[in-house]
Image: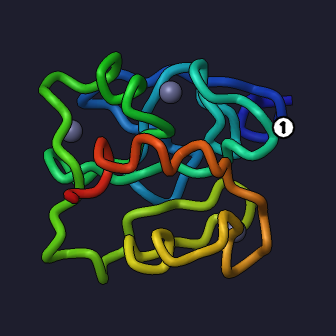
C-alpha cells in the first residue's frame, strides 16, 4: 500500500516542497491525511489554515514555524471572504468568515473542530 492510500500515514514536508496528497498548497510536520499533525492530533484537529505570508496551508502555527523558511503572518482582515481553512475530513474549503462564524463544526460535512483553537485565533487571522 502506498502511503497516499494509508489512512494513518504521516508525512513531513519542508518549504519549498508541498504535500501532494492535498488539493491545496499544504505542508507541515507529521501530517496525516486529515491534516492532523505532530502538534495537534486529536479527532477534532482536522483543519489546516492558510497563512498570509505565503498563502500556504499548515495544520498549525508550529508546523509553519518548523516547515516554512520565514516568520508567520496571519491572514489579512481585508481578505476574509477568500478560502483559508481546509477541512481534512471533506476536503472542502471555508472562507475565514465562514470559519470564524461556524459553531466549531464544518458547515459542509459537520466534522467537529477543536473549540480550543479560538484561544489562538490571532495567530491565524488578523484581529
Ligand atoms: Zn508563511
Ligand atoms: Zn502542527
Ligand atoms: Zn468538512
Residue in the image at 13% along x and 76% along y: 78
User: How many numbered circles does the render carry?
Assistant: 1
Along the line of sight, the residue nearer the viewer: 23 or 124? 124
State the image coordinates of residue 68 (x, y, percent, origin top left): 25, 26
Residue 11 image offset from top left, x and y in percent:
59, 24
Element under disc 1: loop
Which residue was labeled with disc 1? 7
Residue at 82% across, 29% down: 8
Does residue 94 appear to the left or right of 96 in the view shown?
Answer: right
2 lies above or below 94: above
Q: Is residue 72 left or right of residue 104?
A: left
The residue depicted at 34 percent of the width and 53 percent of the height is: 50
In the figure, is residue 113 to the left or right of 85?
Answer: right
Q: Is residue 105 left or right of residue 82?
A: right
Name the spot of residue 57 as percent of width and height, x first. Answer: 39, 48
Asked whether 6 or 110 is in front, the reply is 110
Q: Which quarter of the image is occupied by the C terminus?
A: bottom left
Amino acid at each position: 500500500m502506498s502511503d497516499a492510500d494509508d489512512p494513518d500515514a504521516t508525512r513531513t514536508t519542508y518549504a519549498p516542497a508541498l504535500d501532494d496528497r492535498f488539493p491545496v498548497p499544504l505542508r507541515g510536520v507529521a501530517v496525516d491525511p486529515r491534516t492532523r499533525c505532530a502538534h495537534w492530533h486529536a479527532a477534532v484537529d482536522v483543519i489546516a489554515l492558510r497563512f498570509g505570508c505565503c498563502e500556504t496551508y499548515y495544520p498549525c502555527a508550529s508546523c509553519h514555524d518548523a516547515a516554512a523558511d520565514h516568520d508567520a503572518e496571519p491572514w489579512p482582515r481585508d481578505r476574509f471572504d477568500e478560502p483559508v481553512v481546509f477541512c481534512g475530513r471533506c476536503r472542502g474549503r471555508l472562507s475565514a468568515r465562514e470559519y470564524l462564524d461556524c459553531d466549531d463544526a464544518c458547515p459542509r460535512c459537520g466534522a467537529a473542530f477543536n473549540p480550543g483553537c479560538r484561544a489562538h485565533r490571532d495567530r491565524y487571522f488578523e484581529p
